[in-house]
């Protein structure tokens, strides 16, 4: 198996991912193609919010979705809605925060990460530390921009993201200039507590280390306690050294729109504008849907922060005023539609948006419970999924079958695609001890049927190896 011949310094997780994708493409030639399920996709396959469907239909009717020019930082109604939302996070509940903070829309979070690393390179940064397993994009971009890349992972069982103590030790020994957090960690679903993140940010401030937080999997409307890095960035006066990378692809089930953004200080935004001008302005995207999603997120967090109804009404008025101010040259029918939406039914739509988001989370929980119980005989480890819908498991079957062989067995015999540890790491996993990413954002019946088929294959593999 030549895949393992690369030494640690030359290991490229993208090449390993390509191997697994190559196996998955074989599904087109298999009888199992009608039952194909990707249990590791990282994509949210649950329904999009109802308000997105309605507002996109209105934008199509009024030619609003595709006939508006955008600036270098995106369509202004969208850009400023995201900015109000980020102000809310940085301040812990105040959309009127006065700070050196700006945002720009990007073509997905991938472009945002590309810009972030290019910007930090322009500041002379070269030493990068990845926190836990991460998507191989970071390795690809880090190599492209000439970074020396290291990673730090936990030595504890049932954990991949390093503990706060392990991370601080790694900072002391590896001496990074840039730290990249996937937050929550993708693929493990882990986060830090408020206290831990406060400790970490204090150390980063003390040492003058820059950091990037990739928050694409952070589910905002959730019964789980959400931990946001922005408030800690503000507390430790790290705004000029921290960059937020985010997307609506995973949270709102719209990966095809490639809706991303980058947030940071004005120096970063000046760099972004120059970069965008050389490439292209961000394309049109569903403006009303994003605008109202940012509003609803602020309303939900306002509830969590214990703010009064009067304060929430103030948030609504601010969002409405901003939308009207940034769309003066746009269709009056669209403006009238938004005005009616805000003045007559905003609370009803908010309650529906919230209930749909919490229903998704209920599906994540149900799917996770089903997999844990159905595969209990095979599971020997799993990470704690603090938020999001991805986490990692280890199977006793892994002790007798390698990563690529397992992928092939599951695909050919059950029509199931999975991605394993070596595609997320800077060195290959042990051949008999590796993590598998599980993505829970699938309709329950489809997920359960896939897990049932997975059980049969794992049971067969175990029996075959026992009889050898």
Image (cartoon, helix red, strand yellow):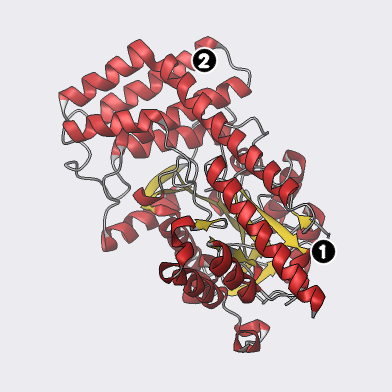
Secondary structure beneath label 1? loop
Q: Nearer the viewer, mark 2 or mark 1?
A: 1
| Quarter that holds the N terminus | bottom right
* Residue 224 place in picture, x, y as percent: 67, 34
Instruction: Identify the residue shown where x is 48% and y is 63%.
Output: 32
Q: Nearer the viewer, residue 33 or 269?
A: 33
Residue 148 image-quadrant placement: bottom right
Residue bearing the label numbered 1: 155
Q: Nearer the viewer, residue 314 or 184?
A: 184
Instruction: Identify the residue shown where x is 46% and y is 65%.
Output: 31
Q: Is residue 69 left or right of residue 157?
A: left
| Quarter that holds the C terminus | bottom right
> Mark 2 packing: few (<14 Cα in 10 Å), some, or many (20+)?
some
Secondary structure beneath label 2? helix
Residue bearing the label numbered 2: 311
Q: Nearer the viewer, residue 20 or 209?
A: 20
Residue 185 shows in this picture: no
> Mark 1 packing: few (<14 Cα in 10 Å), some, or many (20+)?
few
Q: Earlier in the sequence, mark 2 or mark 1?
A: 1
233 vs 25: above or below: above
Q: How far apart are labels 2 and 1 at the CA level?
A: 45 Å
């Amino acid at each position: 198996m030549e895949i393992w011949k690369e030494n640690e310094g030359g290991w490229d997780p993208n090449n390993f991912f390509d191997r697994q994708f190559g196996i998955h493409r074989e599904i087109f030639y298999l009888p199992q193609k009608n039952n194909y399920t990707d249990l590791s996709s990282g994509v949210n396959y649950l329904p999009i919010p109802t308000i997105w469907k309605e507002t996109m239909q209105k934008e199509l009717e009024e030619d609003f979705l595709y006939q508006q020019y955008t600036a270098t930082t995106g369509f202004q109604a969208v850009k400023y809605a995201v900015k109000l939302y980020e102000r809310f996070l940085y301040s812990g509940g105040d959309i009127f925060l006065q700070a050196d903070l700006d945002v720009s829309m990007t073509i997905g979070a991938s472009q945002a990460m590309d810009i972030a690393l290019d910007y930090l390179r322009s500041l002379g940064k070269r030493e990068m530390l990845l926190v836990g397993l991460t998507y191989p994009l970071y390795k690809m971009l880090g190599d492209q921009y000439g970074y020396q890349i290291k990673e730090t992972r936990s030595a504890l069982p049932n954990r991949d993201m390093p503990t706060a103590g392990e991370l601080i030790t790694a900072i002391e020994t590896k001496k990074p200039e840039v730290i990249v957090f996937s937050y929550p960690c993708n693929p493990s679903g882990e986060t830090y507590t408020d206290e831990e993140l406060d400790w970490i940010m204090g150390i980063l401030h003390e040492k003058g280390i820059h950091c990037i937080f990739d928050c694409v999997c952070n589910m905002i409307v959730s019964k789980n306690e959400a931990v946001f890095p922005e408030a800690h960035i503000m507390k430790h006066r790290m705004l000029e050294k921290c960059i937020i990378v985010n997307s609506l692809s995973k949270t709102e089930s719209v990966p095809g729109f490639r809706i991303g953004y980058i947030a940071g200080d004005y120096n970063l935004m000046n760099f972004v504008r120059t970069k965008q001008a050389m490439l292209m302005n961000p394309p049109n995207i569903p403006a009303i849907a994003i605008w109202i999603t940012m509003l609803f997120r602020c309303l939900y967090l306002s509830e969590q922060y214990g703010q009064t109804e009067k304060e929430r009404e103030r948030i609504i008025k601010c969002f409405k005023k901003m939308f009207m101010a940034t769309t003066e040259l746009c269709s009056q029918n669209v403006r009238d539609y938004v005005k009616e939406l805000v003045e007559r039914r905003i609370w009803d739509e908010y309650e529906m948006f919230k209930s749909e988001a919490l229903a998704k989370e209920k599906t994540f929980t149900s799917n996770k419970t089903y997999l844990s119980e159905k595969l209990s005989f095979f599971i020997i480890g799993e990470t704690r999924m603090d938020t999001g819908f991805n986490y990692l498991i280890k199977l006793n079957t892994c002790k007798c079958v390698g990563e690529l062989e397992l992928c092939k067995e599951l695909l050919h015999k059950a029509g199931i695609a999975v991605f394993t540890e070596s595609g997320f790491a800077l060195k290959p996993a042990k051949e008999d001890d590796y993590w598998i990413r599980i993505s829970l954002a699938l309709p329950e019946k489809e997920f359960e049927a896939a897990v049932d088929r997975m059980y049969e294959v794992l049971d067969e593999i175990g029996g075959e190896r026992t009889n050898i």
